[in-house]
Image (cartoon, grey):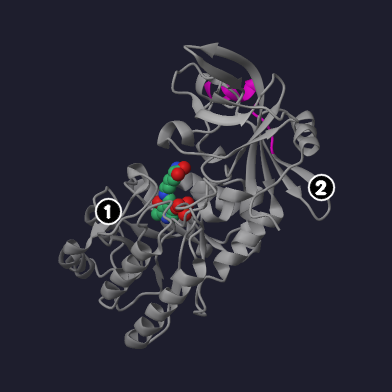
Amino acid sequence: MSEKIELSIEEANGLIEEFGSPLYVYDEEILRRRCREVKGLLGYKRFVPDYSAKANSNLELLRIIHEEGFTVDAMSPGEIYTELRAGFDPSEILFVSNNITFDEMELASRLGVDISLDSLMQLKMYGEHHRGGRCAVRLNPGIGDGGNDKIITGGHSKFGITLDKLPQLFSIIRDYDLHIIGINQHIGSLFYDTDNYVSACRRLLSVAKDFPELRFIDFGGGFGIPYRYRHPEERPDLHEIGALMDELITDFMNAYGREIDVKVEPGRYIVGECCQLLGTVTSTKVSYGEKYVGTDIGFNVLMRPVLYDAYHYIAVYNHEDKEETVNLVGNICESGDILARQRRLPKLHIGDIIGIRDTGAYGYSMSSNYNSRLRPAEVLLDRSTGKRKLIRRRDTYEDLLRSMEL
Ligand code: LLP
């Protein structure tokens, strides 16, 4: 069984013919397999994995992930709205907020969604209006990890309440008679090494004992996936992480005197690898001695390469034997609109289909209408029946104007 979605040349061409280009294509079987792997992370029986929906909030994918037994986190009222529509109960949603307005706080409360607050000031604001209320807090354990500076959140970053502020935190809790039902952290996204994650778990547990009313502890997400298909980008060993965490959790629960829920909240690990973004070669040229291959995948469709210099493996669906070194670029009016620089690929011709791999996480969810380009459609494949299901239609030109036609 493949770890990544595989397509034949015929399938890739057929999909583009039927649904248009570019196109996000997901494999349901791989998605479900990743869900089950994460569900098996801990032996601890009150383990309740959350899916971090910012990675991909397509309704159909959310429904599948829910069916696989996941609860979910939300970053915004919009994510809460989508998750409720996907069938999650309010009690299955954790609003992991960051710099939200009072109205957003109130909306979550009204809906019955638990909220985690990530600064002393926001906790105070909550307390002023909800004396005796219950909420969670996001702590910053001072340990960070991740793929690049923009997505490392533990340690020096805007996130969470640092541990040196615990005395002030406890005094706000006392002042407003708050009940802290959960503590959470997220050290960053896209880490491969297990050490920092496990050390941060240990650190969170070391302060958890000071919160007597906890219902859950949430260690966050961030588990990397192999984008480069080679060392050091290897899949984190979930068995190793799980075994180490289980040990820490058992010791903690014994000392705490009762068992509470334990969560993690991965996004990328769940949805990243089940997807390929298909696109079409639109033109080629040589400029300044370099070959440029133009495609219809601009950075409005896939932002990761431009924003993070992210590497994605590129599959080429033609029968070409010759290879050449090219810059694979999009159709957006900016010089930075480059999917892959100086990449060795089979020779590409106009009309060839390419597949950008591992684009299920932070692909569609970060897409935009920049340059008034249309966002693509999304299709879900069920390999067992051969069914192809359109799970989001392509934008239309009317969609571009809808919110301005007042
Ligand atoms: N929990 C919290 C509080 C988070 O902020 C995040 C991600 C997650 C969980 C899920 O992290 P994951 O397991 O997916 O790594 N756009 C970037 C990634 C941004 C991650 C933001 N927060 C990228 O394309 O690499």
Q: Residue at x 55, y 26 (%)?
A: 325
Of mark 2 and mark 1, the one earlier in the sequence is: 1
The disc labelled 2 sits on which kind of residue? Answer: Lys
Amino acid type of the residue tagged 1 in the rendering: Gln
- Report how many numbered discs are placed on residues in the image: 2
Name of the residue lying farthest toward the front: 322
- In the rendered view, tell whether residue 264 sits above or below residue 346: below
Relative to 283, say whether 269 is above or below: below
Q: Secondary structure at mark 2?
A: strand
**Relative image position of residue 196 (x, y in whole percent):** 34, 62
Residue behind mark 2: 387
- Residue occupying image coordinates x 76% and y 41%: 8
Residue 122 marker: 1
Whether 347 is drawn above or below 195: the answer is above
Quarter residue 135 falls in: bottom left
Whether residue 394 appears in magenta in the rendering, the answer is yes
Q: Residue furthest right?
A: 385
Residue at screen point 70% across, 46% down: 6
Percent across and percent down for residue 141 are: 27, 62
Q: Looking at the image, which is closer to me, 191 or 230?
A: 230
Q: Dot 2, crowdedness within 10 Å: few (<14), some or many (≥20)?
A: few
Q: What is the quadrant of the C terminus in the image?
A: top right
CA gap, disc 2 and disc 1? 47 Å
Q: Residue at x 23, y 67 (%)?
A: 173
Residue range (magenta)? 392-404
Q: Nearer the viewer, residue 180 or 378?
A: 378
- Please tell me which residue lies in front, 21 or 163: 21
Residue 60 lies, in percent from the top left, at 66, 49
Q: Is mark 1 within 8 Å of ligand 1?
A: no
